[in-house]
Amino acid sequence: MPPCVGHGYNHRMALSKQEVLKVGTLSRIRLSEAEVEKFATQLSSILGYVDKLRELQTDNVEPLAHALALHNVLREDQPSPGLTPEQALAGAPESAGDFFKVPRVLDEGAGA
């Protein structure tokens, strides 16, 4: 397949429409035909950038989570009264007894 060129980065393969649709399905996002085309180009460009980064020599570079040293400023936990179920559910669109009611996410028989 010809290289995918976008934003100055070359990626060996462009993502197919089927791959973009699968990502959309896994993300539970419906995509229009125009969005599939747009995201195929954008995601291919991102993968091209990752390929470009793979060219860098990183053998002697220490792995890190952040570019700058971070220090958490934490306070001691202080017990305090919580909300009553009525207060917690006051802004909920739907509730069932003392619980938030949310739409089903998994299909029947899909298992978690």
Image (cartoon, rainbow, N blue to C red):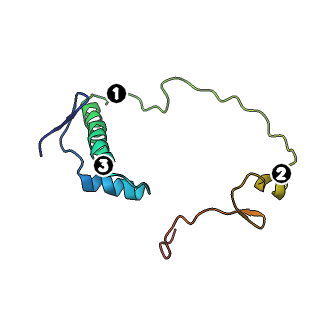
* Residue closest to the eye, 80 or 86: 86
Kind of residue at badge 3: Val
Labelled pair 3, 2 in contact (Cβ < 8 Å): no
State the residue lying farthest toward the top: 68
State the residue lying farthest toward the left: 2
Kind of residue at badge 2: Leu
Q: Where does label 1 land, which residue?
A: 60
Q: Where is residue 77 in the image (x, y as percent from the top left)?
A: 80, 40
Q: Residue at x 47, y 72 (%)?
A: 110
Q: Residues within 10 Å of mark 1 (few under 14, many from 20)?
A: few
Q: How far apart are marks 2 and 1 (CA)?
A: 52 Å
Q: Where does label 2 land, which residue?
A: 83
Nearest to the eye among marks 3 and 1: give it. 3
Q: Which residue is drawn at 63% across and 62% down?
A: 102
Q: Position of residue 106 (x, y in %)?
A: 51, 67
Q: Residue at x 48, y 25 (%)?
A: 67
Local secondary structure at mark 3: helix
Q: Where does label 3 land, which residue?
A: 36
Labelled pair 2, 1 in contact (Cβ < 8 Å): no
Write down the quadrant of residue 74 in the picture.
top right
Local secondary structure at mark 2: loop
Local secondary structure at mark 1: loop
Labelled pair 3, 1 in contact (Cβ < 8 Å): no
Q: Residues within 10 Å of mark 2 (few under 14, many from 20)?
A: few
Write down the quadrant of residue 100 in the picture.
bottom right
Q: Please report whichever mark, 3 or 1, sits nearer to the chain's N-terminal start.
A: 3
State the residue lying farthest toward the right: 81
Q: Residue at x 58, y 26 (%)?
A: 70
